[in-house]
Image: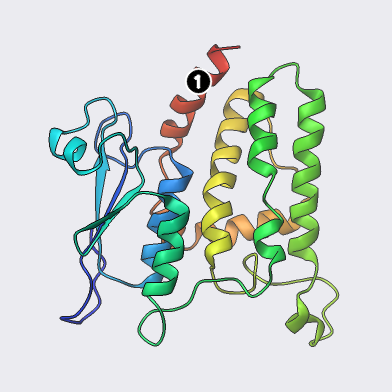
Amino acid sequence: MALRQDSDKEPSIELFIKAGHDGENVGNCPFCQRLFMVLWLKGVKFTVTTVDMRKKPDELKDLAPGTNPPFLLFNGTLKTDFIKIEEFLETTLAPPRYPHLSPVYKESFDVGADIFAKFSSFIKNSPNNTFHEKALLREFKRLDDYLNTPLQDELDQNLSVSRRKYLDGNRLTLADCNLLPKLHVIKVASKKYCSFDIPVQFTGVWRYLQNAYEREEFSQTSPADIEIEKTYLSVVKRK
């Protein structure tokens, strides 16, 4: 898969991500999707290689020994820490040619920080998970409150309830690249194994998800539901 932008000076970028159960399609890995989204949003030309973790090719073992996806080749240089990769891309692929993706508001990064950990405890303790379900719902409530609370530019418009599409406003940022892949996993796995749906009263969360699924940067980088279900089947069986 390649995204093109006319230039003869673009860097050579290859992103390696986890393959699905068929060994080819996109697998379940929120960190892989996070970087996939960042590169797509940057509008830079890049290629994506899916790595079958059951039979990692010898050339990849030589390229990144002991390293699991995601990792990146940037102009031939290997980069393996996804946080450092994201920071590097934000610094290197910068304006005026490429957009900055950093959020304006620090809270946009902080608000979803604990939701995936609460989900992990919830699904690991299903079906005796009332305590963990309440903890997960508290995190969803926190996220919903943030999404429905007007940001400063909306306050300047005298809005009492936010209408923004994403965490930090009406553009996708690094905060969304971090949170949306996790929310997708939570939504699919919780429904499948815990009969849990995100409550409809969390209107901000649902507005956020619906807007995100309309963006190809998110929908086209997301794993199929079956990939998420297969991942968490082993978690449920271990109980």
The residue where tag 1 is placed is: 233
Q: Is residue 124 left or right of residue 55?
A: right
Residue at figure coordinates x 76%, y 75% from the top left: 151
Q: Position of residue 27 (x, y in %)?
A: 37, 38
Front residue of 152 and 15? 15
* Amino acid type assigned to the residue bearing label 1 in the image: Leu
Q: Is residue 207 left or right of residue 137?
A: left
Q: Is residue 85 left or right of residue 52?
A: right
Front residue of 72 and 51? 72
Q: Is residue 202 left or right of residue 170?
A: right
Q: Position of residue 76 (x, y in %)?
A: 19, 59
Q: Position of residue 57 (x, y in %)?
A: 16, 33
Q: Please, what secondary structure does the residue beneath circle 1 have?
A: helix
Residue at figure coordinates x 67%, y 54% from the top left: 206
Residue at figure coordinates x 58%, y 61% from the top left: 175
Indicate whether 87 appears above or below 188.
below
Residue at figure coordinates x 81%, y 58% from the top left: 145
Indicate whether 134 appears above or below 145.
above
Q: Is residue 79 visible?
A: yes
- The 10 Å Cα crowd at callout 1, few under 14, some 14 to 19, many 20 or more, is few
Q: Position of residue 195 (x, y in %)?
A: 66, 27
Q: Quadrant of residue 235?
A: top right
Indicate whether 28 appears above or below 209.
above
Indicate whether 3 appears above or below 10.
above
Q: Is residue 200 visible?
A: no
Q: Quadrant of the C terminus?
A: top right
